[in-house]
Amino acid sequence: MPVPDLTLQQLRAVQAVAESGSFTKAAAAEHISQSVLSRRIKEVERLLRVRLFDRTTRQLDTTSAGRAFLLMTGTVLDELDTQLRRFLTFVAAQSGTVALAALPSLTAVVLPDLIREFMADHPEVTFEIRDADAAEVRGNLEAGTVELGLSDGGDLPDGFCFAPLLREQFYGVAHHSHRWSVRDSLSWADFGGETVVATPPGTSIRARTDAMFGERSIPVSRHFDAPCVAAIGGLLRAGVGVAALPALELREFSLDGLVAIPLESPDATRVTGVVYRRGQALSPASARFLDFVRAAEVDTPRGVSRVRGEAAGCAPGTV
């Protein structure tokens, strides 16, 4: 026997009649006329080849077949209502997951406060966060494993948008016994002849420092490719070279035994913000978080300032 093709309207009509015990009350509850409701019930009974209700002029009784039908379809309708409510909550960006990749300094210093404030109004949203360097952030976005990235905006390929968030001052960092310790400020030229401890290629810091040294033909001794900023701090405390680091990175390790002197140059900064794919249909939660971040006030530490502007690579108001 083929399975009859019943509609949700028909299932809800049967449920409404059984619960109210009246065609008149059921029609009112379903916001339809009694004649429309009656036709729906008759069609269900025709397709099932069984009577669901015994009708008399005085009362309406559910048959044994009707009770069995309601037992099975009631569970389906309840589950459907639950899932639809969840979906509507998802569409309203009150639930769902925000998947993002971020530079470690932004993950540690900036992102926690942003998430706390966002979740005050969106407590059901969850976050999937990946620590990544600039190249890995772009790779995750290209692969579709995340929807948003927090990174620098340098050398983004076509198809990416960048919404600026913060501008960080670069600092020259060295052991407290280094000749820089008596200086109030530095320039890129002061790195000439120094042994530079750097992050690996592919990171936003390395890209910036290599570009500055190359453009100015500043000779530096061989780089130590430290695996992370905390390792750079350890090497500097051991007296192994100097480093150029943006302000947020300095919060990744203790400056005990070190000096950090600002680089006074218009290009001695790193601008970080939100990176995302142009034209991508973000999930409601991610779209809401993107809007929140772009409008948020950020409590900036020393050497960091808030930047506002249209997303580079995207027309105003577009994702």
Image (cartoon, helix red, strand yellow):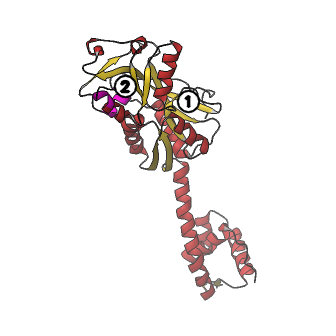
Residue 89, position as x, y percentages in the image: 51, 52
Q: Is residue 273 above or below residue 139?
A: above
Residue 9 visible in the snapshot: yes
Q: How many labels sit on residues?
A: 2
**Marks 1 & 2, CB-CB < 8 Å contact:** no
Which residue is more in the foreground, 84 or 39?
84
Question: Mark 1, residues whose alpha carbon is within 10 Å: few (<14), some, or many (≥20)?
Answer: many
Residue 60 visible in the snapshot: no
Residue 33, position as x, y percentages in the image: 67, 66
Q: Which mark is residue 310?
A: none
Identify the amino acid type marked 2.
Ala
First along the sequence among labels 1 and 2: 1
SS label for mark 1: strand
State which region is magenta.
Answer: 235-253
Question: Mark 2, residues whose alpha carbon is within 10 Å: few (<14), some, or many (≥20)?
Answer: many
Q: Does residue 303 appear left or right of residue 295 in this picture? A: left
Which residue corresponds to the image point at 36% horizontal and 20% vertical from the top-left? Answer: 171
Q: Quadrant of residue 112?
A: top left
Residue 267, position as x, y percentages in the image: 47, 15
Which residue reaches farthest bottom? 64
Quadrant of the drawing holding the N terminus: bottom right
Mark 2 lies on residue: 247
Mark 1 lies on residue: 162
Q: Is residue 94 above or below residue 38?
A: above
Q: Does residue 170 appear left or right of residue 65 in this picture? A: left
Quadrant of the drawing holding the C terminus: top right
Q: Nearer the viewer, mark 1 or mark 2?
A: 2
Q: CA distance from mark 1 to mark 2?
A: 20 Å
Which residue corresponds to the image point at 65% horizontal and 83% vertical from the top-left? Answer: 52
